[in-house]
Image (cartoon, helix red, strand yellow):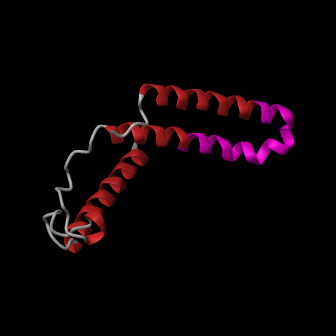
Amino acid sequence: MYTGLIILATGVLLVVFMAYLVHRLVAVSKDPLVVLPYQSGWQPNEHALSRYHVRWYLATLLFLAFDVEMLFMYPWAVVVAELGSTAILEMFLFLAALFVAVVWAWREGALRWV
């Protein structure tokens, strides 16, 4: 009755175990701070797990908001010719809402670095 599920779970566990084993065999060092993937191999000035200033979180959220905007614009660009002026009106309304959000963030000081 549950044979397929048991075979699948066993296969998944086997794949995870094999990936872990391969990683252990080919790893350059056991200490992750020794291999220096941080900053493209340059000697780090600070610890790789150091904290970022809080202002970078807000910049990241703004970037994600505009990145998601682009995710909505790509499918729209494919169908805009078929849908006509209603699609253009909807996109301008969407961009207007984003513009209002940027103006609000600007007024709140979210774009100020100092």
The answer to which image quadrant residue 88 occupies is top right
Q: Position of residue 110 (x, y in %)?
A: 41, 32
Above or below: residue 79 compared with residue 47: above
The answer to which image quadrant residue 31 occupies is bottom left
Above or below: residue 61 compared with residue 42: above
Q: Position of residue 19 (x, y in %)?
A: 29, 63
Looking at the rendered image, the quarter that the N terminus falls into is: top left
Residue 1 visible to an observer of this rendering = no
Which residue sits at x=48%, y=31%? 106
Residue 5 visible to an observer of this rendering = yes
Is-magenta flag for residue 43?
no
The answer to which image quadrant residue 71 occupies is top right
Dominant SS in magenta:
helix
Front-most of residues 68 and 52: 52
Looking at the rendered image, the quarter that the C terminus falls into is: top left
Above or below: residue 7 compared with residue 92: below
Which residue sits at x=21%, y=56%? 48
Q: Position of residue 111 (x, y in %)?
A: 43, 36
Front-most of residues 99 and 76: 99
Q: Which residues are magenta?
A: 67-89
Is-magenta flag for residue 77?
yes
Q: Answer with left or right where residue 23 lies relative to residue 31.
A: right
Q: Position of residue 94 (x, y in %)?
A: 67, 31
